[in-house]
Every structure is written in C-alpha cells, then in structure tokens.
Image (tube, rainbow, N blue to C red):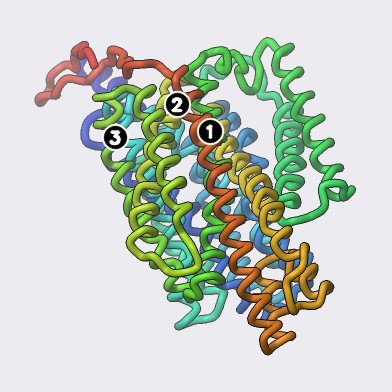
C-alpha cells in the first residue's frame, strides 16, 4: 500500500501546492508578472531613440507603442480558457518561450514593420502569461486567507513592474541602444522556463465538451475591435471617424454574438452564470470603474508635472514613485484588511480613500506644492491598490476552480478595458474643459494662434514659442491656467466615478467567507498520508 499510495499522493500534493512549495510557486508567478508589467511600460522612454533609428511614420510609431497592449487585451479570454482546457502550466510555459523569442526579435529589429510584428508577438506571450499566473495561484492556494495574502503580493509586484519599466528603460538607454530594453527579458525567460517546468503544478478544468474555437476567435476579434476603437478615442481621434466607429461597431457586434453563443452552448467557453453571482459581477464592475477613473488621470498628471511644473521625465518618475510604494504597501497589507473588515468595507473604503485623494489634488495650481502632491499620491496609491486587490480577490474566490483561467482572463480584460475607456473619457473631459479657455481668445494673441493652442498644452507651448515676446508669454500663461482648470474638472469627474464605485461595492459580501480545505498532514518515513480538515 505504501508504494502505491505514496506515488499517487505525490502528484496530488504537487497539484494542490501543498507545503512550503506553494510560496516558491508564488515567487515564480510573480517573476512572470513582473516581466509582463515591465514590458508594458519600458518602451515609453525609448520612443525617441526608436524614432531616430528606424524612422517610422506616424501610424507605424503609433502601432509600435499600442500593438502590445492591444493584442494582449484581445487574447486574454482566448488563452485563459485554453489554459482551463489543455493545462494552465503548459500555456504559461509556451508564453515564456514566445515572450523570449519575441524579445530577441524586437531587440534586433531593423525596420518598423519587424518591430511591430515583434511587439504583437510579445502581446500574444503576455496574454498567455497573465491569466495563467492568477489561475495557477487560485489552484495552489486553496486556503482563502493564504490566497488573499498571495494575491496581495501578486498585485504589489504588478505595481512595481509598472513603475520600474520607465526607470529601467531610462537606465538602459543611457548605457546601451534602444534594443536593450527588450534583451533583458531573455535571460529571465531562460531561467523561468526550466524553473517553471520543474516547480509549477499543472492544473486543468473539468474538460467536459469540446473547446469552443469559434467562440474564442469571436471574443478575440470583438475585444480587438473595441479596444482599438477606444484607444483611437483616447488618442484624440474624431468620434465620427470611420476608423474609430467601424472597429467599435464590429467589435461590439462580435462580443454580442459571443455572449449569445455562450448562452446556447451546453459547454460554454466562459460560464456566463458566474455573472449572476453578485460578488463576481460587482468585482468586475469595480475593476472597470477603478481603472476608468484613474488611468487617464495618471496620464494627465504626468503632463501636469512636466508641462506645467517643468519637471524632467526622470523627476516626474521620481515624483510618482510614492504612489507605487503606497500601492505596494496596500498589496502587502490587503490580506489582513480583507480578513478584518471583509470585501464590502475594504473595497468601499478603498474607493472612498482614492476619491478623497483625488479631491485633495484639486488644490494643485501653477506653483509646485511638493507636500500636497506627496500626500495625494500616497493616498491615491494606497486607496487604488486596496480597491483593486479586494475586487480581484473576491472575483477569483467566487469563480469555480475549474473556471479559474476564464475568470482571471475576465478580470484582466476588465482592467485593460477600464484603462482604455478611462483614457478616452477623461481625455475628452480634459479637452472640453481646457479648450474654451483659449479658443475664446487671449488678449494680445491672434485668434488663429489661440485656436491652435486650444488643441493641447504641448501645442500651445509650441505656438507661444513661435509668437515670442509679450504675446507668447500671455498665451503660455493662459494655456497653463486653462490646463490647470481642465485638470480640476477632470479630478472632480474622476472623484464622482470613484464614489459610484464605492456605492457599487456595497453589493459585495460583508464578511470574507472561508471554506474548509484539505491540508495534507506531515509525513513521516514510510507513513501513510492522512488528511486533516481545517476550518478557515
């Protein structure tokens, strides 16, 4: 009995993430997430160097920057559900390999077209990695209290990656050529592949019925169209533009067809019944609202720091670091907060704290107020991360374990869609509030110059430099005042969205419901494995 039982028990322990090994698994998963998060932002500081070397056109440059998040967001549901079908570790390891190959291709690209293709492949690899990390985490941490701590660490690593990307890119560009921002991925992937194969557990869904290939492609095509249309809106493209409306309409039609198809299938790709669970649907809505309110705001804040206060890109990055550190602290403290206060109060308080921070930042003006910015960014980072952590943890815990890949993909897709819509919505609010301060006319400035300056603050500064003299100074001062006014209006709108999220969070469970899980008892030499039931 001992030989057979021991041999059979080992895979079960490995699959469940038993013992200390599950924390090693968490480290491997966090390294995976760190690479994907860094790669999403590391190219931003390298754009000037890429432009100088490859000479891309305006459209090619846009695709170089946007194709990675666009492809990644489009394929999350496809690869998340594929992992449930064929094995989450298998999809993750394939993602590692593809990410490494695509990084080498991007680093050695000698034409804009090759770089665009490489960035698209990086997006495919990222879409394979991101939902797999969360779904494997769901598998290896059956104890919800431990899982909450693991998700907190996971989310803190994501915050670090987003902040480290531009700083790492800037450091590499000072010492090497622009391709080095991609080469750093290769040694890490060469280590992650064998380590992941050795340490990560394999897990699948129940495997009932065929995988819905048509449905997966419909979801990918629909998300691609919607995200592309939203990104064009966020980039300032006209709402009535055919290249904006057409992707949105086709994408929405494909997603509607996807939902209808899933409802009719005996074995759907994504079990839409999950959305009938208030905690799951509310968590997804909270993720969308949090990102919708804040991602566009971060972009506007970066413009404020650089164009209004005159800080350099490095100084801007350093000013935003407290936000990242506060987010890390919230991720690490999130599990304790969730256990003590429950999902409802944790997420609601996170929304309210973030809204308070946003309202506090309306005190910003033309002069630099370092203490105000530090306080606002710290509160913003802690509140936002508390909200996202609580929402992600509730969403993942509500999903059936066999559907964890699809649930993780839905969460990541909600994050990406919320970010894209936030840039488009808050960017539109900002433009609507900024432009009238200039298009109405500036004393001593030609009307044509005022109208041109109303497009953006950067363009206003260029026009002011061309005018020179008292007219240029007056236009620059008026543009700065109009931008600060627009920023205040945008902050108020953002605070309203956050308070709406706080109201939505009231539908979450009041307490953190912890199920009973089987925990393997310690094994002695030749002992037969026993199971002890522990209430958590």
Identify the element where label 3 is drawn: helix
For the residues marked 1 and 3, what is the alpha-carbon distance in whole angstroms? 18 Å
Residue at 57% over, 13% down = 276
> For residue 149, which numbered disc appears in the image?
3
Residue positioned most to the front: 443
Dots 2 and 1: beta carbons under 8 Å? Answer: yes
Q: Which of these two is toward me, 442 or 336? A: 442
Q: Is residue 29 above or below residue 482?
A: above
Residue positioned most to the right: 242
> For residue 411, which numbered disc appears in the image?
1
Q: Which of these two is toward me, 221 or 204? A: 221
Residue 405 rendering spot, x and y as whole percentages: 52, 30
* Mark 3 surroundings within 10 Å by alpha-carbon count, few (fewer than 14), some (14 through 19), many (20 or more): many
Q: Is residue 157 above or below residue 413?
A: below
* Mark 2 surroundings within 10 Å by alpha-carbon count, few (fewer than 14), some (14 through 19), many (20 or more): many
Identify the element where label 1 is drawn: helix
For the residues marked 2 and 1, what is the alpha-carbon distance in whole angstroms? 8 Å
Q: Which of these two is toward me, 173 or 268? A: 173
Residue at 30% over, 35% down = 334
Identify the element where label 2 is drawn: helix
| Chain-order first, disc 3 or disc 2 | 3
For the residues marked 3 and 2, what is the alpha-carbon distance in whole angstroms? 13 Å
Q: Quadrant of the C terminus?
A: top left
| Chain-order first, disc 2 or disc 1 | 2
Q: Which of these two is toward me, 208 or 73? A: 73
Q: Is residue 196 above or below residue 19?
A: below
Question: Does residue 77 appear in this view?
Answer: yes
The residue wearing badge 2 is: 396
Residue 377 rendering spot, x and y as whole percentages: 39, 54
């Amino acid at each position: 009995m001992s030989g057979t039982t021991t041999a059979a028990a080992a895979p079960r322990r490995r699959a469940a993430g038993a013992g200390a090994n599950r924390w090693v698994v968490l480290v491997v998963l966090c390294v995976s997430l760190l690479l994907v998060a860094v790669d999403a932002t590391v190219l931003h500081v390298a754009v000037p160097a890429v432009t100088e070397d490859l000479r891309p056109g305006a459209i090619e440059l846009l695709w170089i920057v946007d194709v990675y998040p666009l492809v990644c967001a489009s394929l999350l549901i496809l690869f998340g559900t594929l992992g449930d079908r064929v094995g989450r570790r298998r999809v993750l390891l394939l993602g590692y390999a593809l990410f490494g190959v695509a990084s080498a291709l991007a680093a050695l690209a000698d034409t804009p077209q090759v770089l665009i293709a490489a960035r698209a492949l990086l997006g495919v690899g990222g879409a394979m990695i991101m939902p797999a990390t969360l779904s494997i985490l769901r598998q290896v941490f059956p104890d919800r209290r431990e899982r909450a701590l693991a998700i907190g660490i996971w989310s803190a690593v994501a915050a670090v990656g987003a902040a480290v990307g531009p700083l790492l890119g800037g450091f590499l560009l000072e010492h090497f050529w622009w391709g080095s921002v991609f080469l750093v991925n290769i040694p890490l992937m060469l280590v992650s592949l064998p380590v992941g194969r050795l340490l990560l557990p394999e897990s699948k869904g129940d495997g009932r019925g065929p995988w819905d290939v048509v449905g997966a492609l419909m979801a990918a095509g629909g998300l691609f169209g919607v995200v592309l249309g939203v990104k064009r809106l966020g980039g300032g493209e006209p709402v009535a533009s055919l290249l904006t409306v057409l992707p949105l309409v086709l994408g929405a039609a494909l997603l509607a067809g996807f939902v209808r198809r899933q409802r009719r299938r005996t074995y759907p790709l994504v079990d839409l019944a999950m959305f009938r669970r208030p905690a799951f649907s509310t968590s997804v809505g909270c993720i969308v609202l949090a990102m919708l309110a804040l991602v566009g705001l971060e972009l506007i804040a970066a413009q404020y720091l650089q164009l209004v206060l005159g800080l350099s890109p490095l100084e801007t990055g350093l000013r935003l670091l407290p936000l990242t550190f506060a987010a890390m602290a919230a991720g690490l403290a999130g599990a304790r907060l969730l256990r003590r206060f429950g999902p409802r109060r944790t997420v609601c308080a996170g929304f309210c704290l973030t809204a308070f921070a946003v309202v506090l930042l309306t005190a910003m003006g033309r002069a630099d107020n370092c203490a105000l910015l530090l306080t606002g960014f710290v509160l913003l980072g802690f509140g936002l991360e508390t909200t996202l952590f609580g929402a992600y943890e509730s969403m993942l815990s509500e999903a059936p374990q066999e559907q964890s890949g699809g649930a993780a993909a839905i969460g990541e897709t909600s994050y990406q869609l919320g970010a894209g819509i936030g840039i488009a919505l808050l960017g539109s609010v900002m433009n609507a509030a900024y432009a009238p301060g200039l298009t109405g006319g500036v004393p001593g400035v030609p009307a044509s110059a005022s109208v041109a300056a109303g497009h953006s603050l950067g363009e206003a500064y260029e026009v002011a430099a061309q005018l020179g003299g008292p007219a240029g100074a007056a236009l620059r001062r008026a543009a700065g005042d109009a931008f600060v006014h627009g920023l205040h209006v945008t902050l108020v709108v953002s605070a309203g969205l956050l308070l709406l999220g706080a109201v939505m969070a009231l539908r979450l469970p009041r307490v953190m419901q912890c199920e009973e899980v089987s925990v393997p008892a310690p094994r002695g030499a030749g002992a037969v494995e026993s199971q002890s039931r522990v209430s958590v």
